[in-house]
Amino acid sequence: MKPLQLEGCFDERRFCIVLSESNRGTGQQNRTYRIGIKRHLNLPVAVTLYSSELGRMAHANAFLSDDSTIELGETSSPSRFWSNMRVKWTVGDINASHNNNYSYAPPLQPLENYPVVQGVNGSFSHFGASKYALDFGAKKGTPILAARGGIVIDTKSSGRKGGPTPEFAKYANYIAILHSDGTTGEYYHLMHNGVAVARGQRIQVGQLIGYTGNTGFSSVPHLHFGVYVAKYHGRYESVPFKMKTVNVDIE
């Protein structure tokens, strides 16, 4: 008999979904299992679980801000649950309130050498959830400096491809830094192996964090920078921000 699966972990064990036997059922045929979720990385993440076992809504949300287990529902069939479940998540704090008085340092310096090639409401890719963002033109390998201090909450450096259409987005290399107000500063399109920091590392403003590239949904080498708030269903929302010496309207 195939062993009963009671745990499934995601994103290098950032969080795990765990099934535990409930006391409500009696006998082998009547057993029920609680569906719980727990983080294993000491950083906030917003998770949405989708499963037909969750009743009429067929999904449940959980904001993992501490190490407690959050119960999402029950199942009478672990095998059925694992076969049809899926998850989406966004790192960061869903309760974030951006400090609008903070002035971000330029992530590329001296800034006058790196023109803004796409600003707020840019028609190429700065609309919807990514409305408030800046793209700085920069040759591959340009050092990236932290625009604001915080804790590295997510990175990717394995991407090698880039192109001018959305299907390339999954190849983007990036760094996300959690700020003290719960927002994340995100730096995208880094070169392959261009990340110079690690998850959980505390970063100071102006510190070297990586190198620019042309990975992901990108038509020319550049750095994409934006400030975001996490949402459920794997979504996010950009927020207006101020940056020192940038002569564009980002509010």
Image (cartoon, rainbow, N blue to C red):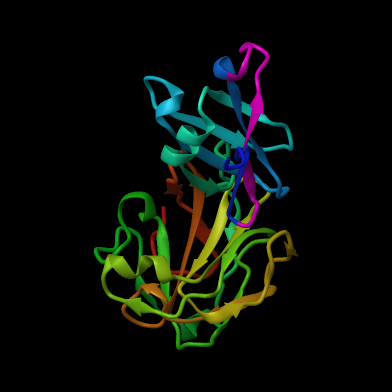
Q: Is residue 206 left or right of residue 173?
A: right
Residue 14 painted magenta: yes
Say which residue appears at 51% left-offset and 58% top-offset.
Answer: 242
User: With 177 as the anchor, is 118 left or right in this view?
Assistant: left
Question: Is 190 inside the magenta-drawn segment?
Answer: no
- Where residue 71 sits in the image (x, y, percent)? 61, 25
Residue 190 spot, x, y in % from top left: 50, 76
Which residue does the image show at 63% across and 11% down from the upper left? 26
Residue 248 shown left or right of residue 43 in the figure: left
Of residue 137 and residue 234, the one placed in the foreground of this image is 234
- In the rendered image, the quadrant that contains the N terminus is top right
Chain part drawn in magenta: 12-28
In the rendered image, the vertical position of residue 81 relative to residue 55, given as above or below: below
**Residue shown at 50%/71% (left/top)?**
173
Q: Quadrant of residue 218?
A: bottom left
Q: Residue at x 53, y 75 (%)?
A: 158
How many numbered discs, if any? 0
